[in-house]
Image (cartoon, coloured by chain):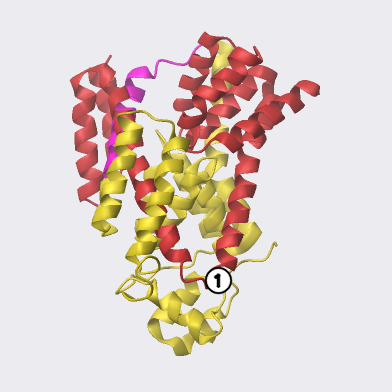
Amino acid sequence: MGGPDRPRGSALAAGSRGEHGLRRARMDPFPISGEHGARSERHALPEAPPATVVPTRLDLFLGYLKIGLFGFGGVAAWARRVIVEERRWLTEREYAEVLGLGQVLPGPNVGNAAVMIGRRFHGLAGALLATAGIYCAPLLILIVLCLLYDRYGQLPEVAPAMAGIAAAAAGMVIGTAMKMAGKLKLAPEALVLLLLATFAAAWLRLPLPLIVLALAPLSIFASLWRAGLILNGAASR
Amino acid sequence: MTLLLQILLTFAILSLVAVGGANAVLPEMHRQLVELRGWLDDATFAQLYALAQAAPGPNILVASVMGWRIASWGGMAMATLGMLLPAAVLAWGVAGLTHRLRGAPWLKPAQGGLVPIAVGLLLAAGLVMAEASSQFGLLPLIVVAASTLFVWRTNWSPLWVLAGGGILGLVLLR
């Protein structure tokens, strides 16, 4: 269980599969054995995948340290920024897929994603390092805040600055969602489902588990249909 | 000792119902800690929430602060562990499962189906945060709009808008 999902040298084994295969093998775990596996993997790839970089264990820890430390008002925007834009560990789509899984599982979505991304690159050590990275700096800061609170009975006068930072953080999250929606080139029905989820959560304020329970199956169904895997058989592949 | 164990258990259960993260689980956390267990009163709960917001990092760490108030540093450790561990173990298991199924032609499209939900809920979280900050008047909404455009249309570091928002808040919202 503890070993990385992505053994070194897998890129070598996949070299004959060309550029796509090579990149895929660097990102994804084991070299795919057998014709069928390789082909279905290639199907899922975007036209021209941007180059990604495999982080070392230290990179993984430091990247997540930054995400935690800079994540005022939540870490969602910083996580995407560091992982996709700055360090290019994953493509936009790969990150969105991991985040999607993190979202439907209980617990913080970015925290869940940290476990999955850490595991993907360095197994148990990776999952632990990513998790430690994202939580350790904020926990230390919280401990200091708790000590101050204990001593003075209230927080130092930071409310006005925090209100401004919270507004900026809100914009960061909105901007990040817009950027992702634009770059992911979603199908029309996926865009509708996206807006439905937004509407249900932001306007109707429905509980998130309910929204996920209602929309996720629908969205998965739509995505499988778009891929030609259901209803119209393999015709559109 | 038993109190620490109770804290661990309470937060472990909260962890497993926390679909959508910290903000989604907050009402249930309030019900458990304030109404059922009586560990905290209403005012303290609200204050501790504000305290947690002042620190960077995942919002779920609000659990750590609650644990700290209930039973000092041991309580903080138990609450943090309880909140993080079950969800992390589940995420680890699911990551393993997707890895084992990686050859299945339906896996990528199925996972792709979760993408619109994740982005949609992210957008919703931003909008809810924006609405919360609008209680301070028009200025925060201008900051929200500027920051949205900045992050959406440029690749510059969002640190600038965070710093700008903080300074504007200090100068104008006092």
Along the horizontal axis of the image, is A173 left or right of B26? Answer: left
Label 1 marks which chain's residue? A
Along the horizontal axis of the image, is A167 left or right of B20? Answer: left
Q: Position of residue B143 (x, y in %)?
A: 22, 31
Q: Position of residue A111 (x, y in %)?
A: 52, 45
Q: Please tell me which residue is depicted at 31% across the width and 39% down the height of the picture.
A: A198
Q: Please tell me which residue is depicted at 49% across the width and 82% down the height of the picture.
A: A36
Q: Which image quadrant for residue B44?
A: top right
Name the residue tied to disc 1: A29
* Residue at the far bottom in the pictured view: A16
Q: Position of residue A125 (x, y in %)?
A: 64, 58
Mark 1: few/some/many CA within 10 Å (<14, 14-19, 20+) = many
Chain identity for the colour red used in the image: B
Q: Which residues are magenta?
A: A153-176
Secondary structure mainly formed by the magenta segment: helix
| Residue A150 shows up from this direction | yes
Chain identity for the colour yellow used in the image: A
Q: Please tell me which residue is depicted at 58% across the width and 50% down the height of the picture.
A: B91
